Amino acid sequence: MRFIIIITIFSMFLACSDTDSSSSTTVAETTQTSDSTPSDKSNLKGVAKSNPNAILGRNPNAESPDINIKINGAQPGLVRVIGFFTGEQYRADSVMTDASGAINIKAPEAWRSGLYYVSYPGDVAFQMIVADDQRFSMVASANDVNGTMKITGSEENELLYKTIQFEGNWRSKYEATRAQTTESERDKLLAERKAYMDNLFASHGNTFYAKFKEAGQNPTVRDIKLPNGAPDKDAQIWHYRRDFWDNVDFNDLRLLNTPVITNKLKKYIDDLTAQRPDSIIASAKFLVDKVLDYPEYYQYFANWITLHYEPLETSLMDPQAVYVHMIENYFTYNRAFWSDSVEIFSLQQRAYEMTSSLVGKQGPNLTVPSVDGGVKTLYDIKAPYIIVYMYNPECEHCAVETPKLVQFNNQWKSQGVEVYAIAVDTEDDKWRDYIKKTGMQGFTNVFDPTNQSIYAKYFVDHTPELYLLNPERIIIGKNLKVDQVAEMINRDKNR
């Protein structure tokens, strides 16, 4: 079970911790790459149906690349150029250096505008902006690429390296003074950085680099006070999340060809949002609704969040709640333009199967054939707490959890707990043998080989699956391990 992330105001609001990663990420982090450029048939199906060049951030009127790079002192060998598309990385080009460390990059048509990493042999790596001006030169020394980089013919890269050099010097001063100077002196350094960025955005706001850099800036913490004059941290965090995307120009598809959007998305969902379904749903709704009129961002955000909380891919207690919300609201026939009707029907059907068994809902009643030849109805059980346990006799994880549940039942049955055990995807003789072998005779044991008795009531996509119902028959826990049940019961009793 993943517990709520506690976020301190200081760590969340560090002004120097941008989300663009433009001066900290290295090519060593980009080794898992595809050998081809993502196209309209990439993992985001249907993105480029109407205008591939616009969607890929490629200006059809831009000049074709003629980029000369020379890194003095670099080892000769193969140079790789790595590009980005949403959360993916791909190899844009590979070029052999000459003896002086020089390469020339040429292509018959314009590259998509975005951020690229250039990786030389010997762990020499640096960044490069490609925008409309795709004919320029870069010269630097291998022992200090960022500090010695000289650009000719590209305003975008001049701004990139001027900013990298400024931030390198600024960060050194800030780190050196953190423990030695007063808060007011540190505030002066922060103000110096803010003034630099404000000037960059005001003077060069029409450049792609400025948009990229601005998109990665964290919002300013609002000065909100409690009646006693102390900072209202809850209100600050709430507004910080709301302000987090204000610097992003969603009209600019080129940002999808940089790490900044994916980095912001991960920070917004994973770090700034408490990892409980209601909080995740609220954050997701705020963001996805913001980009409903920006199809490429809408598709990317809706897909990323839904897959991030795909029930089999997360340890969140109730990922189905997030998944159902996303499917029901955003993967509809009129909104999921990238999917066909068959795919949408399948997704909606799966969400329907999950809907009745979300935490906080009334647990559906069941009437299922029992081991004694009759039927057993879930709500006939009078114990205050009911464990609905779904298992398969041949499941390896069930072999671990079932003996634990038998022991738990022996200890807690007298305290008002009963187990309603449902065998799934098995055969009658295997079910009966398993009950005897594991000592489950103390459970209410049921099995419907058609699965019709439980369909769309208690969702199970892997076994074992354990739900916990309280005296009001509200689902208060799911995806539980046996050793978590007692804690959930005690928590419910004390609420």
Image: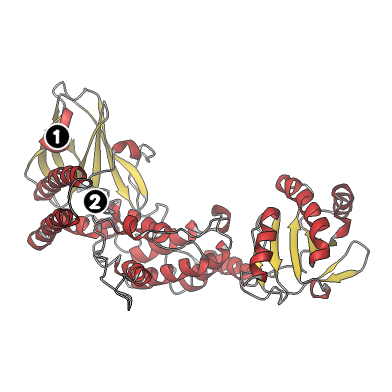
* Residue 19 placement (x, y as % from top left): 29, 54
Give the foreground label among 1 and 2.
Answer: 1
The answer to whether residue 445 is left or right of residue 127 is right
Q: Which residue is mark 2?
A: 112
Label 1 SS: strand
Above or below, 338 against 192 in this view is: below
The answer to whether residue 439 is left or right of residue 204 is right
How packed mark 2 is, by other alpha carbons closer than 10 Å (few <14, some 14-19, many 20 or more), is many
Instruction: Please tell me which residue lies in front, 144 or 292.
Output: 144
* Residue 139 placement (x, y as % from top left): 10, 34
Residue 81: quarter of image:
top left
* Residue 92 placement (x, y as % from top left): 28, 41
Label 2 SS: loop
Label 1 or label 2, whichever comes before in sequence order? 1
Q: Amino acid at mark 2?
A: Arg
Q: Which residue is mark 1?
A: 69
